[in-house]
Image (cartoon, rainbow, N blue to C red):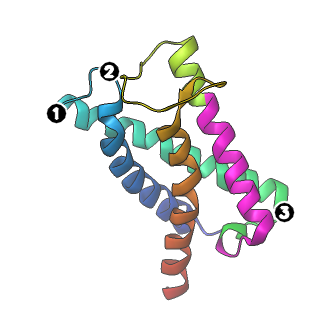
């Protein structure tokens, strides 16, 4: 895979995840009101989200044995996206919330009962990667 695709993937991932992070910020304690600290925190989180999207690309590359798998994912590719996205989001949320105690949810955050993690951050890694891959595929085809 050409390096420009990985860079484009990361940039698009950071941008879209930044918007999502800003939208879900009020669901976290201490982030109910937008200020410079919230904007910065969301930006830093979106950099981590961008890395997670690259990890999903790597997982697909290993499992499907195609570097460009996300451009024409097929059913197997979507299974990889959703499975890897769910596992990564679950791990990050579980560790950040229950182990490292880096954040906590406000009462407004919907929580998955058994797993005790927020629905919004899990949904983020289920919905955004397919959209990101589609956008990058579109721009790559134009190039």
82 drawn magenta:
yes
Q: Residue at 55%, 85% (x, y): give it.
A: 141
Residue 28 coordinates in the image, percent (x, y): 35, 26
Q: Main secondary structure of the magenta part?
A: helix
SS category of the residue bearing label 3: loop
State which mark lies toward you, 2 or 1. Answer: 2
Q: Using the rendered view, name the quadrant where residue 46 is placed.
A: top left
Q: Disc count in the image?
A: 3
Residue 77 coordinates in the image, percent (x, y): 75, 64
Q: Pick whichever of labels 2 and 1 is earlier in the sequence.
A: 2
Which residue range is magenta in the image? Answer: 71-91
How far apart marks 2 and 1 lie (CA) works out to: 16 Å
Q: Residue at 32%, 21% (x, y): give it.
A: 29
Q: Would you call the spot at circle 3 few (<14 residues within 10 Å), some (14-19), or many (20 or more)?
A: few
Residue highlighted by disc 2: 29
Q: Residue at 43%, 42% (x, y): give it.
A: 47
Marks 3,2: beta carbons within 8 A: no
Q: Pick whichever of labels 3 and 1 is earlier in the sequence.
A: 1
Numbered circle sitting on residue 9: none
How far apart marks 3 and 1 lie (CA) works out to: 43 Å
Residue highlighted by disc 3: 65
Q: Nearer the viewer, residue 128 or 138?
A: 128
How far apart marks 3 and 2 lie (CA) works out to: 42 Å
Q: Nearer the viewer, residue 112 or 93?
A: 112
Say which quadrant the N terminus sits in.
bottom right
Q: Is residue 50 left or right of residue 69?
A: left
State which mark lies toward you, 3 or 1. Answer: 1
Residue highlighted by disc 1: 36
């Amino acid at each position: 895979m050409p390096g420009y695709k990985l860079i484009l993937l990361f940039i698009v991932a950071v941008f879209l995840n930044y918007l999502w992070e800003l939208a879900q910020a009020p669901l976290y304690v201490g982030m109910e009101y937008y200020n410079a600290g919230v904007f910065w925190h969301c930006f830093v989180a979106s950099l981590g989200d961008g890395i997670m999207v690259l990890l999903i690309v790597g997982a697909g590359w290993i499992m499907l044995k195609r570097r460009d798998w996300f451009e024409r994912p097929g059913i197997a590719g979507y299974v990889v996206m959703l499975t890897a996205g769910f596992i990564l989001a679950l791990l990050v949320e579980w560790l950040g919330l229950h182990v490292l105690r880096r954040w906590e949810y406000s009462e407004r955050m919907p929580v998955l009962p058994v797993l005790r993690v927020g629905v919004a951050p899990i949904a983020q890694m289920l919905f955004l990667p397919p959209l990101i891959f589609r956008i990058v595929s579109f721009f790559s085809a134009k190039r």
